[in-house]
Amino acid sequence: MQPLPDELSFTEQLLKSLPRATPSAELRERILVQAKKDLEVERRNRQTRWMIFGSAWIFLVCLLLTWTQGIRLKAAAPPASPADFADMQSRGRQVPFFRGDLDLHETVHGDLGIPLELP
Amino acid sequence: MTPDDECSDLLKSLRRGDPLALAELYDRFAGRLYRVALRMLGHPAAAEDAVQEVFLGVLKVRLRLGNLEDLPAYLFCSLRRAVGRIQANRHRWQAVEHTDRENPENWAPQATPCETMWSDSVLQALKRLPPEQQEVVLLKIEGELTFAEIATALGISPNTAASRYRYALQKLRQYLCAQGE
């Protein structure tokens, strides 16, 4: 940069000699108080964000566990065949015979109307 | 420790959210920022609002500042934006509020009591400069920035900043000479 000629240096000095204003003493206090408030709000927001993030993770883990356990159960129990179904039906018919409070006559001629099938 | 190292340490503390770092930043730059804002806005309360906006803005974006190379230039660039916003709001208020329409001096620059007749004519001459030259003069004289810092703050080359400053001084001299005659 070239140095300023004398006449311009004089103008520069004039500008530099202008009275210098200073900010009020309250401004510093006001800014620092507001800054503390902003930092506190920021800290709370960060905490809330982490809580939401953590809850979302827990929910996802539960969902994953439910899903994987469902798959595991399906894999452990083979699907029912038509023979299993017929077997289940015949067992269902035999259930009343295991009730102790029914006598044979009632069972055969009672309201249930289930025919007696002796082995 | 160089001023750059000090600024870098200050930024590190600020990034951690240390209020003392903000206090130190304020002590170092507030006076210069306030003087520039006051000359641009002409009203102490508006200038204080602009300075407050700058410091709280720095605190808000502190994590995104990264390795800021030129902290003073960044602060003055933020000040320019804050001043622009306040001026825009002021125009909006003036358009809406009846009282301001009646009293346009409400927002007119207020002279401090210690300003002399001579400084008043210098200020008048300063106001007659084109805005881009006026800005460079204010950043140089009141902001105490180097031409490189002014260039960074305004997004121009240092040579352009220096030549604007020189033209501004020449014009000021002409105005003052014309007033003296």
Image (cartoon, coloured by chain):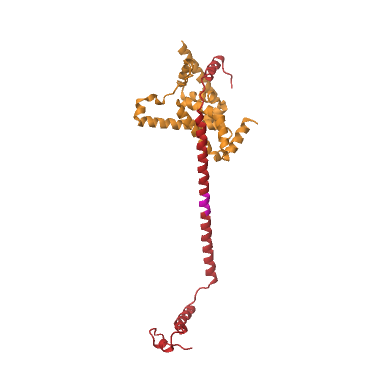
Chain colours: A red, B orange
Where does residue A24 sit, x and y in percent of width and height?
Answer: 50, 28
Q: Is residue B90 magenta?
A: no
Q: Is residue B178 above or below residue A41?
A: above
Q: Residue at x 48, y 15 (%)?
A: B118
Q: Is residue B118 above or below residue A23?
A: above
Instruction: Locate residue A45 relative to residue B100 in the image: left or right.
Output: right
Q: Nearer the viewer, residue B146 or A13?
A: A13
Where does residue B103 sit, x and y in percent of width and height?
Answer: 36, 25
Can residue A71 be spotted in the picture? yes
Number of numbered discs: 0
Q: Nearer the viewer, residue B109 or B77?
A: B109
Q: Is residue A52 magenta?
A: yes
User: Magenta residues, as a range?
Assistant: A49-54
Where does residue B78 sit, x and y in percent of width and height?
Answer: 51, 33
Q: Is residue A94 above or below residue A4?
A: below
Can residue B155 be spotted in the picture? no
- Magenta stretch secondary structure, dominant: helix
Q: Residue at x 48, y 27 (%)?
A: B37
Instruction: Locate residue A40 relative to residue B3 in the image: left or right.
Output: left
Q: Residue at x 52, y 39 (%)?
A: A36
> Which quarter of the image is occupied by the N terminus of chain A?
top right
Quadrant in the rendering for residue B144: top right
